[in-house]
């Protein structure tokens, strides 16, 4: 009888709390205070230590964002990594998440001190037409109380009210997609903002692009492979009156010489073997917009007069036709070769060169702007890992010291590889070495050369020996799945010596 009375009293308390919450939602004095009230209500009813509301997004470059944590314990809010991983699970499975050990459930190998304190975890999706657009997440400290199916039922009831409130208040739109801010950020991302760097050389390039954008004049982009010539071309297009019109990119080196004319100017049906239908060429496709001719030096010499004619007269004929087609196209060309030398060898027409080279812009190599490497590396890792991984300062110093003969393209590929193979959330020099040394890349060096670069680039603010030793032990423990004896064997040291170092660096 006492148990029944206790259960009945608990049900009445739950109903009273949910009724208070419903009244708060209907008054909607302050959106974020109301969201905090939702979290606090869930925490109170489920006796949780911490709580948060997250919203998901597929329209902008992030999977989830924590909108609010419980205000009373803000300093002990749920770690972003844990929030994000649970959000990923809920987004995929579209049902509540419940576990007594979140670290074990999410397979954390080397958790931080903050994450190590977490125990039971529960998340309930916020649904719209059966699809999750967010979640309520509750966590208890390790060794604390567990959550039950009853708690899931309670939070699921609250989640229905919360989802209606969030949709009615348009909180998701406010968090993810303020139209003006989004448009401005997209323009910045596609325009000069896409040319990352803090160096004087990149600032000069951005200034030239902003000036060149409104002009109708041709632009010739010069620079080594991988320096970002197509990115610069797109930025010029974005900063021009043609920004809303097509941007068409053509790699001249990838087109067989026999198909070049058809590719640029189009052809009529039956004009040659294989021409089974009339096709518009790149000039027609980019009418009103911008045509980017990459690796212009690869254009066949016999076709160059026809390109010159189009640039001067703004008209052309399709292959197999005598009908003139007029177009309004701005041409931006790019080359990684010395066109003046090609002219001297009769491999490129001088008149075409002068027609293209009205506004010359030189893209610098990474070797010339090493101060930009940390900026690019952090941006690429943020992109590829979704903000889940970071470089430490020593790793950024190593990256800045490497040659990067493939320039930004090579750096980007290397960072993508690192984001895939690195297990730890913090990328250190040792992890950097492990994930890049085996790559067939011009960046790859032997161990001695790698360490020499590290010594040359390392600042005296931290103990390099301790940093390297800690990283090596950490990697060995990961490789041995936490088995100290196996890790000692891998490192070639006695187990007791390794245990002392594990304790020294707090790697338990």
Image: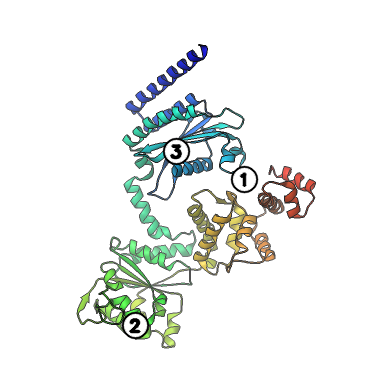
Q: Give the spatial CA distance, label 1 vs label 2.
A: 60 Å
Q: Nearer the viewer, mark 2 or mark 3?
A: 3
Q: Foreground mark, 1 or 3?
A: 3
Q: Which mark is residue 93?
A: none
The extreme top residue here reads 1
Mark 1 to mark 3 CA distance (whole Å) = 25 Å
Q: Residues within 10 Å of mark 1 (few under 14, many from 20)?
A: some
Alpha carbon separation for disc pair 2 and 3: 61 Å
Q: Which residue is mark 3?
A: 95
Front one among 156 and 293: 156
Residue 378 shown left or right of residue 280 in the figure: right
Q: Is residue 507 left or right of residue 409?
A: right
Residue at the spot 40% in from the left edge and 56% down from the top edge: 189
Q: Which callout, 1 or 2, points to the residue nearer the camera?
A: 1
Instruction: Say which element carries label 2.
Output: helix
- Residue position marked by numbered label 2 in the rendering: 304
The part of the image, by quadrant, that contains residue 281 is bottom left
What residue is shown with label 1?
109
Closer to the camera, 45 or 179?
45
């Amino acid at each position: 009888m006492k148990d029944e009375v206790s259960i009945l009293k608990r049900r009445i308390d739950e109903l009273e709390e949910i009724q208070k919450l419903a009244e708060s939602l209907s008054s909607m004095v302050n959106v974020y205070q109301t969201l905090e009230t939702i979290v606090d209500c869930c925490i109170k009813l489920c006796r949780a230590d911490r709580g948060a509301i997250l919203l998901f997004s597929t329209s902008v470059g992030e999977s989830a964002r924590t909108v609010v944590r419980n205000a009373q314990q803000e300093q002990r809010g749920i770690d972003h990594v844990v929030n994000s991983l649970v959000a990923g699970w809920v987004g995929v499975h579209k049902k509540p998440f419940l576990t007594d050990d979140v670290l074990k459930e999410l397979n954390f190998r080397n958790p931080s001190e903050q994450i190590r304190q977490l125990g039971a975890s529960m998340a309930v999706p916020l649904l719209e037409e059966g699809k999750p657009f967010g979640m309520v997440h509750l966590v208890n400290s390790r060794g604390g109380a567990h959550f039950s199916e009853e708690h899931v039922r309670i939070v699921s009831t609250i989640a229905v009210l919360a989802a209606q409130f969030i949709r009615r208040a348009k909180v998701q739109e406010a968090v993810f997609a303020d139209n003006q801010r989004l448009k401005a950020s997209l323009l910045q991302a596609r325009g000069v903002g896409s040319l990352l760097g803090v160096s004087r050389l990149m600032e000069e390039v951005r200034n030239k692009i902003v000036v060149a954008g409104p002009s109708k004049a041709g632009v010739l982009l010069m620079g080594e492979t991988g320096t970002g010539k197509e990115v610069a071309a797109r930025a010029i297009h974005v900063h021009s009156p043609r920004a809303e019109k097509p941007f068409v990119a053509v790699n001249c080196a990838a087109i067989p010489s026999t198909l070049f004319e058809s590719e640029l100017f189009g052809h009529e049906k039956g004009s040659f073997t294989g021409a089974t239908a009339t096709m518009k060429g790149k000039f027609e496709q980019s009418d009103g917009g911008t045509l980017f001719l990459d690796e212009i030096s690869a254009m066949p010499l016999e076709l160059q007069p026809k390109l010159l004619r189009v640039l001067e007269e703004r008209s052309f004929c399709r292959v197999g036709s005598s009908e003139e087609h007029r177009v309004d196209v701005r041409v931006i060309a790019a080359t990684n070769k010395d066109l003046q030398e090609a002219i001297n060898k009769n491999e490129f027409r001088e008149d075409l060169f002068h027609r293209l080279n009205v506004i010359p812009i030189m893209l610098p190599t990474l070797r010339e702007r090493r101060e930009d490497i940390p900026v690019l590396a952090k941006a690429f890792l943020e992109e590829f890992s979704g903000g889940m991984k970071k470089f430490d300062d020593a790793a950024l110093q190593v990256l800045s010291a490497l040659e990067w003969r493939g320039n930004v393209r090579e750096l980007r590929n290397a960072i993508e590889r690192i984001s895939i193979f690195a297990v730890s959330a913090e990328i250190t020099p040792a992890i950097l070495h492990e994930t890049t040394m085996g790559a067939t890349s011009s960046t790859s060096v032997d161990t001695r050369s790698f360490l020499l670069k590290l010594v040359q680039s390392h600042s005296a603010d931290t103990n390099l020996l301790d940093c390297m030793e800690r990283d090596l032990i950490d990697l060995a423990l990961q490789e041995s799945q936490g088995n100290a004896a196996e890790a000692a064997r891998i490192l070639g040291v006695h187990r007791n010596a390794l245990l002392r170092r594990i304790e020294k660096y707090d790697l338990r």
